[in-house]
Amino acid sequence: MLSLDYKTEPMLIFHVDSHEVHRHYRQCVTFGSFPSLRHEMVYNLFCLTMLYVAPITIIVMSYGAIVITIVRKTKLTADVLEN
């Protein structure tokens, strides 16, 4: 369901447009898709966060949890061996 949301959004934002001088050149652009520059900025920051910041945060937290678990297990093993 979440992937459907991610696929629908580009269909609404991007559109094919021709270059002003070179009419044969067509490209997907976002020009004119937002009511203001502020809306476009919010969209770009949201995309940046979802594509880069959120994944790296999740990865770092996951690896941190793994390291903490390993350290705790190692201390438990060391304590058992000492007794």
Image: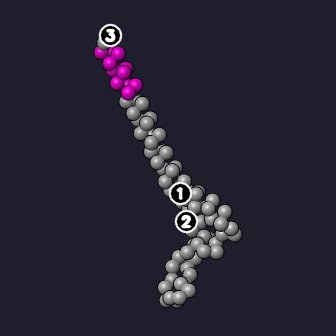
> Which of the numbered marks, if any, corresponds to residue 7?
2
Q: Is residue 4 left or right of residue 80?
A: right
At label 1, the amino acid type is Leu
Q: Using the image, determine if residue 16 lies above or below residue 1.
A: below
Of the two numbered discs 1 and 3 on the same chain, state the one appearing first in sequence. 1
Of the two numbered discs 2 and 3 on the same chain, state the one appearing first in sequence. 2
Query: Element type at marker 2?
Result: helix
At label 3, the amino acid type is Asn
Say whether residue 72 is magenta: yes
Q: Residue furthest right?
A: 35
Q: Using the image, determine if residue 82 lies above or below residue 48.
A: above
Using the image as rendered, state which of residue 40 and residue 75 is in the foreground.
Answer: 40
User: Residues at badges 1 and 3 in contact (C-beta under 8 Å)?
Assistant: no
Residue 57 can be seen, yes or no? yes
In the picture of the structure, the residue carrying the numbered disc 1 is 48
Which quadrant: the N terminus?
bottom right
